[in-house]
Amino acid sequence: MSVWTRVRMLFNAEVSSALDKAEDPRTVLDYAYNQHQELLVTLRRGLVDVATAKQQLEQEAKRLEQRIPQLDDQARRAIAAGRDDLARVAVERKWLAANEIEGLNKQIAEVETEKQRLAGQERTLQVRVEQFRTHREVVVARYNAAEAEVRIKESLAGVSGELAELGMAVGRAEEKAERLQARARAIDSLVEIGSFPPVGGGDFVEAELLRITVSKEIDEELERIKKQSGGAGSASSTGSARETKKP
């Protein structure tokens, strides 16, 4: 396949797609229905014209038929008056009238045939118009329903995308909350077992041993102070008693 052929195929595809998007089926159906109605109106007008022409032919034939007895009477009176020439004219007019009536009857028959044909077409077209109207309403209703469904699904698709993003954000938030809860539980366990390092740094065990030693030394110092305070108090009491016994 040549490059030009591919380009032409792509161009035709794009044009077809653009036309498909721009073409509203409802507009096409309305136009087609209007065309059917216009054709029906034109056919009915033609039927009226044919019926009018037939009526005119019938009236002309009736007028000629009414003239034949008059021409017969004129011919008889002319012969009675000895005017064969006038009688001949009357007979010639009668003959022409009879021929015209025969021609008019043929035309009337032809017009009647055409009238019947047009009347049949008018009935057929009327049925087709009614069927097309029903079909148009069904197609338009289906198109409107499909269009509404597409709009809803497009909206749902957009909402679904947003909900998916929100779901991911919620998942991340839940994961972060779980991590924080796990950290809090770990901290609680550390507090329970006394695993926090001293504020100044260093080893925890060494710090505890130092605390025990310092506490012991403090206790010993306090005990020594108490003993000293107790001995000094006893000596003071003895001296006072001796002074009291002197005369």
Image (cartoon, rainbow, N blue to C red):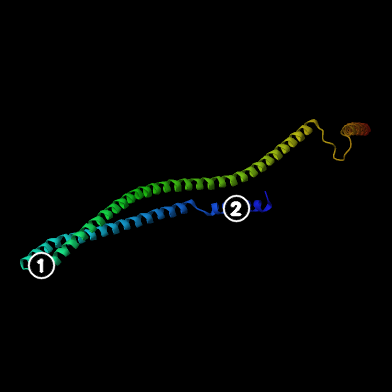
CA neighbours of label 1 inside 10 A, class few (<14), some (14 to 19), many (20+): some
Which residue is at a point 57% across and 47% down the rendered structure image?
154
Q: Position of residue 43 (x, y in %)?
A: 34, 55
Circle 1 sits on which residue? Answer: 84
Q: Where is residue 119 in the image (x, y as percent from the top left)?
A: 30, 51
Can you name the residue that lies furthest to the left here?
Answer: 80
Which residue is at a point 13% across and 64% down the rendered structure image?
71
Residue 241 seen in this snapshot: no
Q: What residue type is labelled 1?
A: Asp
Is residue 68 positioned above or below 177 on the image?
below
Looking at this view, is 62 or 217 the one in front?
Answer: 62
Which residue is at a point 29% across and 59% down the rendered structure image?
49
Q: In which quarter of the image is residue 157?
A: top right
For residue 158, side relative to residue 49 (left or right): right
Q: What residue type is labelled 2?
A: Asn
Q: Quadrant of residue 50?
A: bottom left
Say which quadrant the C terminus sits in: top right
Is residue 196 positioned above or below 90 on the image?
above
Looking at this view, is 95 or 41 the one in front?
Answer: 95
Of pointers 2 and 1, the one earlier in the residue sequence = 2
CA neighbours of label 2 inside 10 A, class few (<14), some (14 to 19), many (20+): few
Q: What element carries label 1?
A: helix
Circle 2 sits on which residue? Answer: 12
Residue 57 seen in this snapshot: yes
For residue 194, side relative to residue 105 (left or right): right
Label 2, label 1: how many angstroms apart (C-alpha)? Answer: 88 Å
Q: Which mark is residue 224?
A: none
Q: Where is residue 97 in the image (x, y as percent from the top left)?
A: 18, 62
